[in-house]
Amino acid sequence: MDIGCGPGDITNDIILPALHPNAVIIGTDISEDMIKYARKTYSKEKQLDFDVLDIQTKELPAKYISEFDHIFSFHALHWCFDIKQAFKNIYRMLRPNGTMLVLVVSLHPICKVIQETIQDNRFAPYIKVKIHAVEIYL
């Protein structure tokens, strides 16, 4: 599974070719529009599919529990407000001895911009970010 696959290009172009030729991968994203685009552009019968999933859900779909040998996530998990729930779900989705590969942004110049924008009264009402999440996870 690829968590936070966005438009599906990384899932299709990088992850899938790196796996066994018979591997099956599901790209997931919280955005229905991204999943619609990915399905239209990249779905390959029986090898690559896409599905809407909020990795922070408290009600993980049963079809995903203990179903994956490998879970990937690139540039997505640092946007989670409930990172603890996200990792609980990842753990539940992995089969015994499964692996996880995650790339998370820890520091980037945009972090400073976000923090300053949140504190600006002109923009703060439009930004739904918890300040402690930005300070801890970015």
Image (tube, helix red, strand yellow):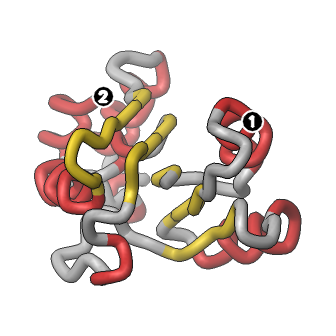
Quick check: 113 above or below 73?
above
Q: Which residue is mark 1?
A: 17
Work out which quarter of the rendered image holds the C terminus and state it.
Answer: top left
Q: Amino acid at mark 1?
A: Pro
Q: Which mark is residue 138?
A: 2
Quick check: 97 above or below 101?
below
Point 79% across, 39% down: residue: 13
Separation of marks 1 and 2 at Cα, in angstroms? 30 Å
User: Whole-percent x and y of residue 11?
Assistant: 67, 46
Q: Judge by depth and name the residue closer to the eye, 63 or 32.
A: 63
User: Whole-percent x and y of residue 72?
Assistant: 46, 41
Q: Amino acid at mark 2?
A: Leu
User: Whole-percent x and y of residue 44?
Assistant: 81, 65
Q: Is residue 12 rendered to the left or right of residue 4?
A: right
Quick check: 97 above or below 37?
above
Task: Indicate the secondary structure of the residue bearing disc 1.
Answer: helix
Q: Judge by depth and name the residue closer to the eye, 138 or 24.
A: 24
Where is residue 115, by image quadrant? top left
Q: Is residue 44 rendered to the left or right of residue 4?
A: right
Q: Judge by depth and name the residue closer to the eye, 34 or 117.
A: 34
